[in-house]
Image (spheres, helix red, strand yellow):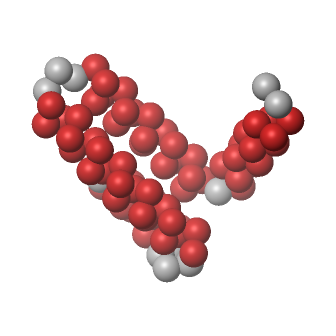
Amino acid sequence: EICKDIGIQVTYKKKKKQNPCLSLYRKTYQKKLMYAKRSENENTKHKFDNWKKLAKEKVKEFNTGVISENELIDWLKNS
């Protein structure tokens, strides 16, 4: 690994520790990803792809201050 990659990983881990909703996003993403990968149902994979696009938008909205931390957490828990 090069220093640039290590720096990116360290920064991401710090950001995740400081912000519980980003940690929840990561856990939710990984759970849905594994479910979609293990499923033979194409509809499940399609639903995950749609969720992933929407989740990225929600995180972007959170990072820019459009939605609050609580709104993102609620959305992740109910998605």
In x, y percent, where is residue 66? 49, 79
Q: Nearest the camera: 5 or 67?
A: 5
Residue at 30% over, 50% down: 51
Position of residue 54 in the picture relative to residue 1 (left or right): left
In x, y percent, where is residue 36? 28, 30
Considering the image in quadrants, where does the N terminus appear?
A: top right
Residue 39: quarter of image: top left
Residue 44: quarter of image: top left
Position of residue 26 in the picture relative to residue 39 (left or right): right
Q: Is residue 10 visible?
A: no
Q: Nearest the camera: 49 or 69?
A: 49
Residue 18: quarter of image: bottom right
Q: From what the image shows, is residue 32 above or below residue 41?
A: below
Q: Is residue 68 visible?
A: yes
Residue at 35% over, 54% down: 53
Q: How many marks?
A: 0
Residue at 51% over, 47% down: 24
Residue placed farthest to the bottom in the image? 66
Position of residue 77 in the picture relative to residue 27 (left or right): left
Q: Nearest the camera: 73 or 58?
A: 58
In x, y percent, where is residue 47? 21, 44
Residue at 13% over, 36% down: 43
